[in-house]
């Protein structure tokens, strides 16, 4: 592999031939587009990389409901992640583990069939909850019988001067799903359900508005709770009924909801706390909805339900304190090499001149999502095929394709939120300008101004030089220098631009940042 592009034959290993052209168009180097006023084109959701039992249901569900396939597929990722819960984590290296927590959202206008599609994805969660409710009813009846016996024994012991026997423990109903709940109530549920829960909201804007609404001035720890839960970091939940807080060592909460494009800013709520960055978004184009005779087959529903059940039934180890102690899932040797290259390419995108500063937050979280997708896809494959629980190269490749899709969707969301940054546009154009010149340019400012094609270019050469100097100061790989040099026998001003990593890792002039230009660069 070179740059961020995975080899075409590797994509074909997992049945991704039709995605190769799309993926080529979003190479890590070539895809550093400046944010534009017009939304980037929506990508086609890569159904072929989803777990086998999911693909048929996604296709049949989208055809029957007449909705984009991601309306079914995006919540599926959160559902499968919640089925795994705290039972497994992926070990990338010592000190870095990722669980299966997914915060996902569908962005669409009202009436675009989001709710029917979500119900398809949630069907096995509802079914599992119904079974747990019935089990709880039986346990509650048994508890009533035990309480009657305990009361008789307690009175008998009291007559005889003996201590009361231990009171039977009241059973808790195991949960798979929560919908409209406070953080305080959610903390109690997580204590009773250490495997974890899936939280869904028809409208995420309402979820955001409800945060901290009961706190004085609307300021509280609700947002912080979800920030910590995303990374399974321990949280303390204050409870009115008790003096001491409820400590949850490994909170697992998957989140899925829908949001309208016009109210997307409410998810950020004017705060730079990173809550918005923790979401992966599906933001497809609107589609015409007409009557369809297509239906979802029982086989498609049952295959997906069996996968959910198989993941949920995986044993969840606990430590000496009764807290979850997830089983560590490891990489196959060849898979780890693919992951390392994918992470390096992903980070390389963020270092490119012109990479929008607004996207650095979500891109940093997408690095974790790459590992989370690997875990979910590998565990789903292991459950479906009865295979060993480890991440294979094909799982990583499939996760990379999912990551590419959500990157394009993130660009759509953040362009809609923040619009165009001219400095990013200029930096991206300069980066492309240098790539076709082996990563180096050195000549007079007027020559640069004439040769550089960019709508964001300042009108004068000296203004362009100032802008590029400022851009280079913020870029780890773009060098800017200026001074005098000999040209046509005369002393002239020059500007020199160097991409330190050049094109696909090869730099025409590989000097250190801050080193004075020499004769080796020549005049481009």
Image (cartoon, rainbow, N blue to C red):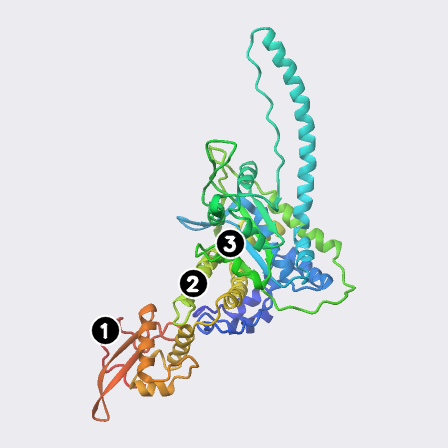
Query: According to the image, label 1 marks what residue?
Result: 515
Tell me how far mark 2 sits from mark 3, CA to CA: 19 Å
Measure the C-alpha gap from mark 3 to mark 1.
Answer: 42 Å
Q: Position of residue 489 (x, y in %)?
A: 21, 93
Secondary structure under badge 2? helix
Residue 359 screen position, x and y as percent: 45, 64
Mark toward the start of the polypeptide (2 vs 3) = 2
Quadrant of the snapshot with the C terminus: bottom left
Tag in front: 2 or 1: 2
**Is residue 236 toward the left or the right of residue 293 in the image?**
left
The tag on residue 372 is 3
| Callout 3 crowding tier (Cα within 10 Å): few <14, some 14–19, many ≥20 | many
Q: Nearer the viewer, residue 298 or 287?
A: 287
Residue 472 picture quarter: bottom left
Q: Are marks 3 and 1 in contact (CB under 8 Å)?
A: no
Query: Which residue has dot 2 on it?
Result: 360
Mark 2 to mark 1 CA distance (whole Å): 28 Å
Please identify the residue farthest to the top as the structure is shown: 160
Eyeballing the image, is 261 above or below 235?
below
Residue 84 located left or right of residue 61: left
User: Residue 277, how many percent across, how many down?
Assistant: 48, 58
Which residue sits furthest front? 217
Q: Give the mark nearest the N terminus, 3 or 1.
A: 3
Q: Position of residue 210 (x, y in %)?
A: 55, 49
Q: Can residue 342 be seen by looking at this rendering?
A: yes
- Residue found 39% across the figure and 75% down from its top: 427
Does any portion of residue 232 appear in the rendered image?
A: no
Q: Quadrant of residue 151?
A: top right
């Amino acid at each position: 592999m070179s740059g961020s592009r995975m080899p075409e034959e590797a994509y074909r290993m997992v049945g991704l031939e039709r995605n190769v052209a799309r993926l080529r168009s979003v190479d890590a180097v070539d895809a550093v587009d400046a944010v534009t006023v017009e939304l980037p084109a929506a990508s086609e959701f890569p159904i072929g990389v989803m777990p086998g039992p999911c693909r048929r249901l996604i296709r049949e569900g989208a055809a029957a409901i007449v909705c984009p396939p991601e309306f079914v597929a995006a919540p599926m990722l959160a559902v499968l992640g919640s089925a795994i819960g705290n039972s497994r984590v992926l070990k990338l290296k010592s000190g870095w583990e990722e669980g299966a927590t997914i915060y996902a959202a569908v962005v669409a206008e009202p009436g675009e069939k989001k709710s029917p599609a979500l119900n398809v994805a949630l069907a096995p969660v509802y079914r599992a909850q119904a079974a747990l409710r019935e089990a709880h009813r039986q346990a509650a009846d048994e508890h009533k019988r035990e309480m009657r016996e305990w009361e008789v024994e307690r009175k008998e012991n009291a007559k005889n001067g003996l201590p009361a026997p231990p009171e039977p423990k009241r059973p808790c109903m195991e949960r798979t799903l929560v919908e409209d709940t406070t953080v305080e109530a959610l903390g109690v549920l997580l204590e009773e359900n250490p495997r974890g829960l899936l939280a869904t909201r028809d409208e995420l804007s309402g979820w955001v508005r409800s945060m901290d609404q009961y706190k004085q001035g609307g300021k509280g720890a609700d947002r912080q709770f979800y920030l910590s839960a995303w990374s399974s970091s321990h949280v303390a939940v204050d409870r009115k009924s008790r003096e001491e807080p409820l400590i949850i060592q490994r909170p697992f909460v998957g989140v899925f909801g829908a949001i309208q494009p016009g109210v997307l800013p409410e998810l950020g709520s004017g705060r730079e706390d990173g809550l918005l960055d923790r979401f992966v978004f599906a933001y497809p184009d609107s589609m015409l909805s007409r009557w369809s005779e297509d239906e979802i087959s029982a086989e498609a529903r049952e295959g997906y339900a069996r996968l959910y059940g198989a993941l949920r039934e995986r044993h969840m180890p606990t430590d000496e304190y009764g807290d979850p102690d997830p089983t560590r899932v490891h990489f196959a040797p060849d898979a780890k090499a693919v992951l390392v290259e994918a992470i390096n390419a992903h980070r390389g995108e963020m270092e490119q001149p012109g990479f929008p500063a607004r996207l650095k937050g979500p891109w940093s979280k997408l690095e974790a999502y790459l590992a989370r997708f690997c875990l979910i896809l590998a565990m789903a494959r292991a459950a479906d095929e009865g295979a060993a629980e480890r991440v294979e190269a094909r799982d990583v490749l499939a996760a990379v394709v999912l990551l590419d899709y959500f990157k394009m969707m993130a660009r759509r969301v953040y362009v809609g939120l923040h619009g165009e940054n001219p400095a990013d546009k200029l930096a991206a154009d300069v980066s492309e300008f240098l790539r076709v010149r082996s990563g180096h340019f050195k000549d007079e400012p007027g020559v640069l101004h004439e040769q550089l094609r960019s709508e964001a270019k300042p009108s004068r050469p000296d203004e362009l030089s100032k802008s590029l100097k400022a851009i280079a100061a913020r870029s780890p790989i773009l060098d800017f220098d200026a001074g005098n040099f000999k040209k046509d026998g005369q002393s002239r001003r020059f500007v020199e631009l160097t991409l330190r990593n050049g094109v696909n890792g090869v730099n025409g002039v590989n000097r250190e940042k801050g080193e004075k230009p020499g004769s080796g660069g020549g005049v481009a």
